[in-house]
Image: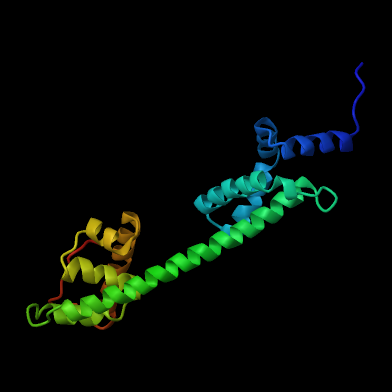
Amino acid sequence: MLPTLPVKAIEHDFIARLKLKCPITFGILYKRYSKNVYKRIIFITKNKQTAEDVLQKTFTKAWCSIQAYEPCKASLYTWLIIIAKRTSLDELRYIDYRNSMKCENLEECLDLIDHSYNYELYPDGIGVQKAIQQLKREHKIILSLVYFQGYTLLQTASTLHLPLGTVKSRLRAGLKKLRLYYYTDELQSGIYVPYSVE
C-alpha cells in the first residue's frame, strides 16, 4: 500500500503547481470551485448572463494574480470568493454606468424628436402626442421614433443601442399604457392605436 500524503502537503503541492501556471492544475481548480463560486456570483448579480461573464473574469483574474495568493491568509475557496465578489460589484457598477449613458442618449433623442416633429402636418397626432408625454421615458422615446418618425423596429434598436427584443417589449408596454390612458380618461372615441397589444 502506498503511503498517503497529509492533506496540507497535497494542498501545498497543488498551490505550488498553480503558481507555476500549470494549465491542468487550473482546470482542476475550476472544476473544484466553479459551481460554488457561480452560486455566490448569481446571488450578487441576479442575472445568469452577467454571472457567467463574472465567473470567467474571476478565474482569469485568479490565473493572472495567483502569485499574490498567500495560503496563510485565506483558503483557495475564500480567495476566489473575494475575487468573485469584487468582480461582481465592478460589473454591476459598469452596467449601471452603461445604462446611465443610455439615459443621456435618450435625453438627446427626446430633444431631437421634440424639435423635429411638426404638429401642423399631423393634426390627428396631437392628442396621441399628449398621451405619450404621460409615459415613462423609455416607452416615450420608442413610441415617438416608431409612430412619429417612421423608424422600423430594427432602426429604433440600432439608434438607441438596444436589443430588438427590448425595443419590442418596451413598445408593447408603452402601447398598453396608452390604452389604459385612453380608457381611464374616456378619450377612446375615434382614436385608434395602430398596434395589437394582446
Tell me the quadrant of the picture where the N terminus can be found: top right
Lateral position of residue 101 relative to residue 125, left or right: right
**Residue 69 on image: x %, y %:** 76, 49
Q: Is residue 151 left or right of residue 19?
A: left
Q: Position of residue 31 (x, y in %)?
A: 67, 36
Q: Establish if 151 lies above or below 144.
A: above
In the rendered image, residue 174, in percent from the top left (x then y), is placed at 30, 69
Q: In the visual, does 113 lie left or right of 88?
A: left
Q: Residue at x 12, y 80 (%)?
A: 118
Residue 144 can be seen, yes or no: yes
Q: Is residue 177 something that shows in the picture?
A: no
**Badge count:** 0
Q: Residue at x 12, y 76 (%)?
A: 190
Display colour scheme: rainbow
Q: Quadrant of the C terminus?
A: bottom left
- In which quadrant of the rendered view does residue 159 lie? bottom left
What residue sits 64% from the left and 46% below the top?
64
Depicted 139 relative to depicted 15: above or below: below
Please name whichever residue, 150 or 98, is drawn nearer the observer in this view of the structure.
98
Q: Quadrant of residue 146?
A: bottom left
The residue nearer to you, when weighing 111 against 190, is: 111
Q: Residue at x 65, y 33 (%)?
A: 23
Q: Residue 62's spot in the image, x, y percent?
A: 67, 47
Identify the image quadrant of residue 87: bottom right
Which residue reaches farthest left?
121
Query: Is residue 114 depicted above or below 22 in this figure?
Result: below
In this picture, residue 44 sits left or right of residue 160: right
